[in-house]
Amino acid sequence: MHQYSPKHGPVPRWLAGVFAASVVMACAPGCIGQPPVPVTRSDLALTLIEVERAIAAVSLAPAEVNAVNRDFDRASLAFFSGSYAEVIRQLCDLRLRLVKKAESPADRVAGSLKARVDPPVWTIGSGVKPTARVTHVFEAAVPAENLQLAFRIRDRGGDVKFERAFTVQAGPTTRVDQTLEIDSGSAAWTPGAFTLEAAPRGGTGVIIGRWIVSAKSLDAIRVENDARLDSLASDADAGLADAIANCRGRNGLLRDRPSEDNLAEYLADLPELVRSVDAEIVALKAGRNPYRRQAGDHWRTLRLAGATSSCRVFAPAAATGDTAVPLVIAFHGAGGDENMFMDAYGRGLIKVLADKYGFLLATPFTYPFVFNPALADELVVALARDYSIDRSRVYVVGHSLGSGAASRIARERPGLAAAACCIAGGDFGGARQSCAALVFGGAIDPIVSARSLRRGTDEAATAGLAVEYRELEDYGHTLLVDRVLPEAVEWLLQRRLTTEPARSRRAARRAARSEARAATTAPAKP
């Protein structure tokens, strides 16, 4: 689904190392001790969700903020090296320290596990008996003993639908590979998305996988829906044509074996998506655009510069009427995807801010925009077909690699964004023009140095650009996002686009002051 080409220009210079590291990471997902089942992006995502939940639940002292940031960034560096299992091990250690269970062997082993159900999408009444395979991601080092653990399946409401005890022979290299039968009585299950959990017997669990229960094969539903979409008029106007293409992209997520490396598939509530896509096709057949003024959080595809790319859109109630609202476009960091700002970075904190301030939020797949910032203009046009957008209040914010996209848009797309915010990144050195921009750096960031960010923003400010730098002493590369987002959003929303570039206005004011001084010092005319 993510299509892009590097032909549109160079990667911003400060970002070349981060981008290269992300390519290495994407091509070489390493592992520790060769676990029985490959470690995937879905495992990383579930671990990150658990860590962010733990961080949100505690109040950190100043000294702990520094230590937690350093530990998280060590895991980030492991991520860029391509060792998924090592990332999960380090994040497991961090989570256990935060929840005060670092010395619990059972909790540590539970955190080292992953689970996959076969079939991953189980059809009620199919006659197939589902089984869960529980394996280790990394070899937990704990005292040698037999540990009693529980495997659980929870519904979206948090209720336990199934539980099975199992025993693990723990030790300095704890290896797990167990298969557990799941009760397949149809009366026990209804269509839905379920979480898989490992826990000490009677204790609090950690999410180690997901499972889908469906009333019908998702592959069959997808094929039927494609045929329904094929029957729609080919001469639809641009807005309806985009809606048809978007519905086709959403329908493409319906698969009996969701990809563990495509989080849009893996993390989606696919039975709910079945219902949504069906209703969307009914609307399209009636000539209506089902995405116009659509409320809430939804995944969509966009046609930009002839290619298809993915985006999440969140529209609070304030953005679903005819009154024009601000638009915030948020670009994720290297190795991430369109889900990062919505589900991570403070557990989707930016959605809370969108609700609070009433702005439309879009979080596209970043990479195409790094190469071609003009895609941002097309993104705004596409969203404006469905929502009423205040074109004087379009803003861009980015993290790390995403800051490269945000800063290029700020510099190269005059008249698009009223302001930009770059977190742990951004390139303004040597810029000749830019909208107003705010750059945040973490003093202990091991990936993008605060010194380089400060130097670039100082250079831009000296050139007369409205670029500002702020640095946080005890923050590093990633948790910096959670910390500064409220401040960043408030700063952005205070600014509006004017027709005259900021540098031109300042130059005009300086010229006017110079003329005034000259008039007061010049000899009086006879």
Image (tube, rainbow, N blue to C red):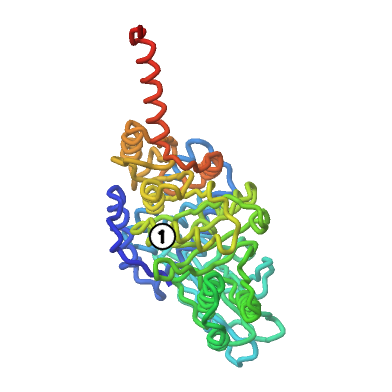
> 418 or 80: which is nearer to us?
418
In-image side of 121 versus 25 (left or right): right
Q: In the image, what residue type sits under mark 1?
A: Leu
Task: Identify whether 233 is placed above or below 353.
Answer: below
Task: Identify whether 509 is placed above or below 497.
Answer: above
Considering every residue shown, the one lying at the far right of the view is: 187
Provide residue 440's location: percent of width, then percent of height. Answer: 43, 40
Label 1, residues with CA under 10 Å away: few <14, some 14-19, many ≥20? some
Q: Secondary structure at mark 1?
A: helix
* Residue drawn where x is 28% and y is 40% of the image: 430
Considering every residue shown, the one lying at the far front of the view is: 526
Provide residue 283's location: percent of width, then percent of height. Answer: 65, 77
Q: Quadrant of the C terminus?
A: top left
Q: Is residue 470 visible?
A: yes
* Residue drawn where x is 60% and y is 86% of the image: 123
* Residue drawn where x is 61% and y is 58% of the image: 315
Quarter assignment of residue 3: bottom left
Considering every residue shown, the one lying at the far bottom of the view is: 127
Q: Is residue 100 visible?
A: no
Provide residue 136's location: percent of width, then percent of height. Answer: 44, 70
> Which residue is the site of mark 1?
375
* Residue drawn where x is 37% and y is 15% of the image: 517
